[in-house]
Image: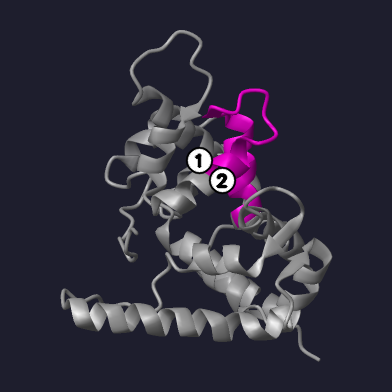
Amino acid sequence: MALIGRIYFEDLRNIMNISDGVSFSLYLDDIFKDLINKVPSVKGNIGINKGSFSSFIKLPTFISEKIFKFITRDQEHSHVIQLYSFIKFFSDLYLGSFQVTAELIFKIYDLDNDGIIQIQDIKHLLSFLPLKADTTNNVEEEYIYQQKSLEMLDNMLIKPFKNKVSMNLEQFLLAIEDSAEFFLQFLCFLYISFPISSDCLWIYEKSSQKGSNTDTSNKSSLNNTPLIKESPRIYNES
């Protein structure tokens, strides 16, 4: 039987067009430095604080805080994201194997970090994602849309959870092999929403081939190619 989750995962990765780990790390290093420089000088500043990270990724507050907590949970200093953790998170997300990326999503879903994900927690997190592209200012229509969204979430989770209310990592990895929508929808949302741009990676690829840091002469070529893309707001904060 075809492993549906892996097939669509590979399709997503091909669309993202990010494949070289060295150049991507150099790119992330520059973004990290840029975010650090935007914060007023603080003695002993060793990372990106929650406010700066939230402003960077521009996601609903609940999801942003979940991701910040996940990235910093194994650090000595949990109040800021350090360089290694910043690069590791985005590298695992964009370049990790199917299992590595799936484990990352599982850990974001695992709200209390106990190795178990609850169906209600996933429903709450996914409720922040858009289930249709257009929005409306009509209160009555928006209420109907929200109700339909919850019904769609229920239907999405019936098959992978198989009448259970929770699952561990091993069960999650088995479930997303052929019933992957609740994994891929969130992953796709992150890919679309995160301001990571592949347009300027060619500069870093040239630099990595030389085995040095990004050439300052080449950096002038980035003047019209921003390090980060403008992320579309495709969700409703609630």
Q: Residues within 10 Å of mark 1 (few under 14, many from 20)?
A: many
Looking at the rendered image, the quarter that the C terminus falls into is bottom left
Amino acid on which disc 2 is placed: Phe
Q: Residues within 10 Å of mark 2 (few under 14, many from 20)?
A: many
* x then y, percent, for residue 4: 70, 84
Residue at image point 74% right, 83% down: 162
Up/down of 49 relative to 17, above or below = above
**Left or right: 186 as drawn, with respect to 142:** right
Tell me whether circle 2 and circle 1 mark residues in contact (CB < 8 Å): yes
So how many labels did they put on this image?
2
* x then y, percent, for residue 198: 46, 55
> The magenta stretch spans which residues?
67-93
> Mark on residue 24?
2
Helix, strand or loop status at disc 2: helix
Of 65 and 223, the residue lying toward us:
65
Of 222 and 127, the residue lying toward us:
127
Q: Residue furthest left?
A: 137
* x then y, percent, for residue 199: 41, 54
Mark 1 sits on what residue?
27
| Residue 194 appears in view | yes
Residue at image point 45% right, 34% down: 50
